[in-house]
Image (spheres, coloured by chain):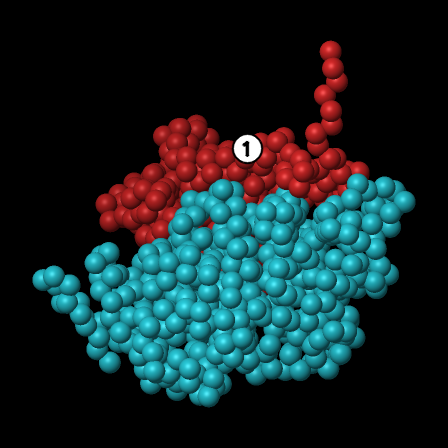
Amino acid sequence: MSQKPAILTPDPWQQLQGLTRARVALGRAGVSLPTREVLRFGTAHAQARDAVHTALDVDLLASELQADGFRPLAVHSQAADRATYLRRPDYGRRLAPACSGRLVENGKNHWPARPRLAIVVADGLSSLATSRHTRAFLAALRAHIPDLSSQPLVIATQARVALGDEIGHLLGAEQVVVLIGERPGLSSPDSLGLYLTAGPRPGLNDAQRNCISNVRPEGLPYAEAARKLAFLIDGARRLGRTGVDLKDDSDAPALAAPENGPRIAAPETAIPFPPNVNLLEIPA
Amino acid sequence: MIHACTLGLHRHVFPDLKAVLAKASPARSGDMLAGVAAASEEERMAARLVLADIPLAHFLDEAVIPYEDDEVTRIIIDSHATGAFLPVAGLTVGEFRDWLLSDAADTASLAALAPGLTPEMVAAVSKLMRNQDLILVAAKCSVVTRFRNTLGLPGRLAVRLQPNHPTDDPRGITASMLDGLLYGAGDAVIGINPATDSLPAITALLRLIDDFREQYAVPTQSCILTHVTNTLRAIDQGAPVDLVFQSIGGSEGVNSSFGVSAALLDEANTAARQLGRGTLGNNVMYFETGQGSALSANAHHGVDQQTIEARAYGLARRYQPLLVNTVVGFIGPEYLYDGKQIIRAGLEDHFCGKLLGLPMGCDICYTNHAEADQDDMDTLLTLLGVAGINFIIGVPGADDIMLNYQSTSFHDALYLRRVLDRRRAPEFEEWLEKMRITDYRGELLAQSSQYPLLGLAESIQEAP
């Protein structure tokens, strides 16, 4: 048996890999990426793409939430499909006409008349995040809000954050929280974002909300995210509003960086940020 | 002014110049979202036929955003050099395309013409050009800028080393920076997008790179890509600021949404120049732009996104920047839907910027919700290399873990150098050879612990 000659040129600074998640010291084939890295990158991209394009299994999620004591209702936005959703963010911010009547009726029959908190569970840009984290996160939130399951819960598809404004308004809710799949990163296909808005009604802008980003076990853990959201809900109730004036002083300093670098405009959901930040969503 | 033409049985009427420009633009999702795109392919061609017959001189009479309403328009009109415009003053847009492709347009005549062109003229002619036209004409342009090295020389390609980290961790940033330098990247700038806007954190990052640069005598410049007001405060506090970064757009409204104005940029440009930190030149501004920002800020005035983008270059050239970077695929599919649209936009931006006399680079990039992948980036990278782009971005493995998008890798730059024979900035090239990172041909050398940078990499590991 003849030994294979060395084909790749390894990078003798692999110890740097311990200092960052960045793809350093990849080595090279000639000047190009080694096959192993091309496949690793391709896999991460495939998972992120699937997170964007896989439809949320609404029936499954609804039955799970029902088992947890909620009375969920499913609605959808005016974006008929994913291709339209991606091209027309404005459609994703409006409820399909057929859904508003059902929502109001359901509200009368099953939910409190002037609910303190409406919960909107939305697919956003990663249905993977929504299907993976919703139940566990709501269970963690229940530790802070014991009667959580009596509040309205709406599962919304082809939805953007601002769809919660219309839903909250139709239900007459004091506050609405939107749990939504964030734009998937290469190494984080399943980040869930939480957007809290007081006095929801159509026409609000993103400076009037508070956001908790990157909720997932590898990012901001459920219990921590629930504690922060409960803190913001309390704060908003006292202050009478959400947004720039409401600071998450529960721990870290405020951190909002819309002007940094190429973030010339962002997609609907915030770019997953490091955990423990209270940032404003960038206007979409 | 109303413009019209008849195609077959249809009479196509366009109420004004901006409508002609918008409907002549190649299809893209942002113009559809704004409601300014052509309604049919025939209408698009009708608009191009009309556009081809409009005299370039007409662009000086009909502003797409009124002079009285918009600071960018005022800068464009007030800075227009009538004398420089003379060689093409009698041409229509269609004739201008022919002239640009002709042998009369060479590197010297294009450089002399630049101050005589307005962004709208340049955007207009780009709409009549195929991708190969955009490449051919851009390749004839040469824009050279200097701070601590010389960027944009013929046959050269520079890389912005972008060692971002989600929490600005100094060791994480240093790891990515060393990785890039050991791959021969970093001549355009070592530039960090910080995770925070806090001034102490920004100053700490500035010192981190500057101390390293001083210690190893690296002939390059550093930049922390924070808001211009933060950079001004850092300058006030005596921080080592080389370049002033700012995102800009092509209307007063989008700039005010970024929190900037010409007066503020003037102030920053003056402040950075006064520091006198450049050893070879004093180009101190680093701008980033990108199609779609004006629509996203609700400040597009019914102008198509490519024309607005070119107007941002009209603002940029007021400052003789070191670097202008169009961040082409970051904005998302509602503005540039897929690989085809991203590739076209990248070529347009590079062409328009170069024709206006700017040192254009491109962040060849995409997000995971766009219909694009690495193959599309390879295509745009290769095309822009052929077109003579001044610089591209270098991120470890093309994966920016702070901004969560895919850009180009250090390997990508090496690929382009190899297939197109593009060398690094001469001063940086010399430094790499001295540091035993590359050989005399610019090829990477096998590294040894005895070599300075690998020695440094190993010492970081040893830190607690």
Colour in which chain B is shown? cyan
Determine the residue positioned at 24% across, 80% down. B1
Colour in which chain A is shown? red
The amino acid type of the residue labelled 1 equals Thr
Q: Nearer the viewer, residue B105 or A7?
A: B105
| Chain letter of the residue carrying label 1 | A
Q: Position of residue A242 (x, y in %)?
A: 50, 60
Residue A24 quadrant = top right
| In the depicted structure, whether residue A53 falls above or below residue B32 | above
Point out the residue furthest to the front here: B103
Which residue lies under the disc numbered 1? A43
Point out the residue furthest to the left here: B9
Point out the residue furthest to the top here: A1
Q: Position of residue B62 (x, y in %)?
A: 32, 82
Residue B298 quadrant = bottom left
Q: Nearer the viewer, residue A209 or B357?
A: B357
Q: Position of residue B196 (x, y in %)?
A: 66, 60
Residue B35 relative to residue A117: left or right? left
Residue A108 relative to residue B199: left or right? left
Whether residue B270 can be seen here: yes
